[in-house]
Amino acid sequence: MLTLLLSLQASYAAPLILLAQNRQDDRDRVKSEQDRQRAERNLADTEYLAREVVALRLAMEEVATKEFVRDELRDLLEELVKELKAQNKATDKTE
């Protein structure tokens, strides 16, 4: 009798166990697909950000630095001083 009861229990438990395993396989498959899609998005985002960083670096090379502007202003000031001195000398001679 006990053997019969255990066989009966095994006969209905086995399909339920297989069904649960199939469901878990399906969940694992969906999860791995989502992980793959997330990894692809992360890779695309990383590549986009890398391109943006390169573009910013290139743009920064074209931007005038503070030193460059200071040197240019200094050169212009020196030229103006020379021109003013030349004009003062010319006006002194005419007087």
Image (cartoon, rainbow, N blue to C red):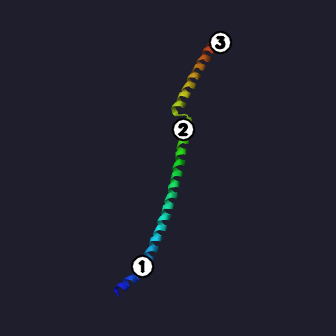
Is residue 69 positioned above or below 26 on the image?
A: above
Q: Between residues 62 and 79, which one lies in front from this camera angle?
A: 62
CB atoms at circles 3 and 1 under 8 Å apart? Answer: no
- Crowd tier of the residue under label 2, counting other residues whose Cα lies within 10 Å: few below 14, some 14–19, many 20 or above: few
The earlier-in-sequence mark between 1 and 2 is 1
Residue type for callout 3: Thr
Instruction: Describe the element under mark 3 as helix, strand or loop.
Output: helix
Residue shown at 40% from the left, 82% from the top: 9
How many numbered circles are shown?
Answer: 3
Residue type for callout 1: Ala
Residue shown at 47% from the left, 70% from the top: 22
Q: CA distance from mark 1 to mark 2?
A: 69 Å
Instruction: Describe the element under mark 1 as helix, strand or loop.
Output: helix
| Residue wearing tag 3 | 94
Q: Between residues 92 and 46, which one lies in front from this camera angle?
A: 46
| Residue wearing tag 2 | 60
Is residue 64 positioned above or below 22 on the image?
A: above
- Crowd tier of the residue under label 1, counting other residues whose Cα lies within 10 Å: few below 14, some 14–19, many 20 or above: few
Quadrant where the C terminus sits is top right
Q: Between residues 68 and 77, which one lies in front from this camera angle?
A: 68
- Crowd tier of the residue under label 3, counting other residues whose Cα lies within 10 Å: few below 14, some 14–19, many 20 or above: few
Image location (x, y in percent) of residue 66: 52, 33
> Which quadrant of the structure image shows residue 82?
top right
Is residue 67 positioned above or below 54 on the image?
A: above
The earlier-in-sequence mark between 3 and 2 is 2
Which residue extends farthest bottom? 1
| Residue wearing tag 1 | 13
Residue shown at 39% from the left, 82% from the top: 7
Residue shown at 43% from the left, 75% from the top: 17
Q: Is residue 95 visible?
A: no
Q: CA distance from mark 3 to mark 1?
A: 120 Å
Residue type for callout 2: Met
